[in-house]
Amino acid sequence: MTADKKWTRTIMKSIETQLFKGKMIVLYGPRQVGKTTMSRQLLSKYHSMGGYYSCDQLNVRQALLSQDAETMRAFFDFSQKILVLDEAQLTPDIGRSLKIMADSFPESQIIATGSSSFELANKINEPLTGRKREYFLYPLSLAEKYQIKIPHSKLAQDLIYGLYPEVASAENAEDKRHILRELASSYLYKDVLIYESVKSSELLDRLLRALAFQIGGEISYNELASGIGVDKKTIATYIGYLEKSFIVFRITPFTKNRRDEIKKLRKIYFYDNGLRNMLINNLNPIEYRDDIGGLWENMMIVERLKMQKNNGFFANNFYWRLHNNQEIDWVEEYGGRLYPYEFKWRRDAGKPTFFQETYPEAAKTVIVNRENYRNFLTEGIADEDKPNLRP
């Protein structure tokens, strides 16, 4: 069964509540996570299949580049209830074009999708101020893949192969490996390499491999620069591009400026475990791996972000560490209170108390393991004495 018919995406319901309210919908996300599929599902539901336009096509880009309302009227079918501009970031100065479209054809519901935030995000914010609603589509969440109950028996497979829709749809390990290989080779650098300051796919590959091997650990740009053989500024620039292409993301440390708290380092995680594992060419089963702790931490953090975004749960997210190496993997700041979490693959891991000793007002630290992670990812709680964090 193909990915475009199998999965019900949680964020779809939120998007539908905002349709036909005079706001443009902007949908971001990595390549191959289902933005086109979701757009076509919306078009079909509202009988507007003729409203799909791919900015991969030159004539679509030319119509948008005209920045002329009459030219747009002649090209686009505004009789459709919904118009989708797929891969909108491929059109230069897309923000101005979208503004003209929104102002000239307010009766049309326009949805713009983009796999890279370089152009789409940076160029639309000012032109579309007050005219848009933004959404982010991740790879599948565990809750989306399994709908009702996440089965423990599938967890090891998802830790290794990740949750890109096409990978999740594949029937066997060989197909999953083939799809991941295609994702890593054909799509990974496509958005990044179109920018003039990015000169080398080889450098990007070395940087990503270095980040993949340090999953769950703190990252020093100086150490990365020394190991790869470039300057620190180049490392920072390239990591910024990788973030904007939705390959990796950063988490900064929580601190109240105590002398013993880490303040400047950061952790970098991958949006998908499978892509990370393919970068280091290691798709071995979990019983043969020495990085299971990092894989578990990466998956839980990404899944938590999906839960937050998909359910409108807004929190500030951090990690925390002291110079004596005591640390907490994940700290959420929500409603004026701190909620610390530790991610442990082993069920018998003990519960640390040092965060509460430093911040007595914080909630109790919760260990998220193979027994309780389903509540953590679907209900926002992992401990019965802890209040539900969802609004």
Image (tube, rainbow, N blue to C red):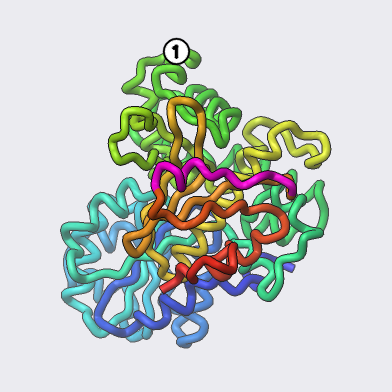
Q: Is residue 350 visible?
A: yes
x and y percent of residue 25 in the render? Answer: 34, 71
Q: Residue at x 63, y 38 (%)?
A: 294
x and y percent of residue 341 in the render? Answer: 53, 51
x and y percent of residue 47 in the render? Answer: 47, 87
Q: Count residues near mark 1 (Cα–Cα under 10 Å), then give few for <14, some for 14-19, many for 20+.
A: few
Depth check, front residue: 261 or 11:
261
Looking at the figure, which quarter contains the N terminus?
bottom right
As shown in the figure, which amino acid type bears the numbered disc 1? Ser
Depth check, front residue: 307 or 94:
307
Quarter of image, res 357:
top left
Question: Relative to residue 106, is residue 254 depicted above or below?
Answer: above
Question: Relative to residue 142, is residue 352 depicted above or below?
Answer: above
Residue where numbered disc 1 is placed: 226
Magenta residues span 348-359
Quarter of image, res 390:
bottom left
Q: Residue at x 35, y 62 (%)?
A: 60
Depth check, front residue: 107 or 146:
146
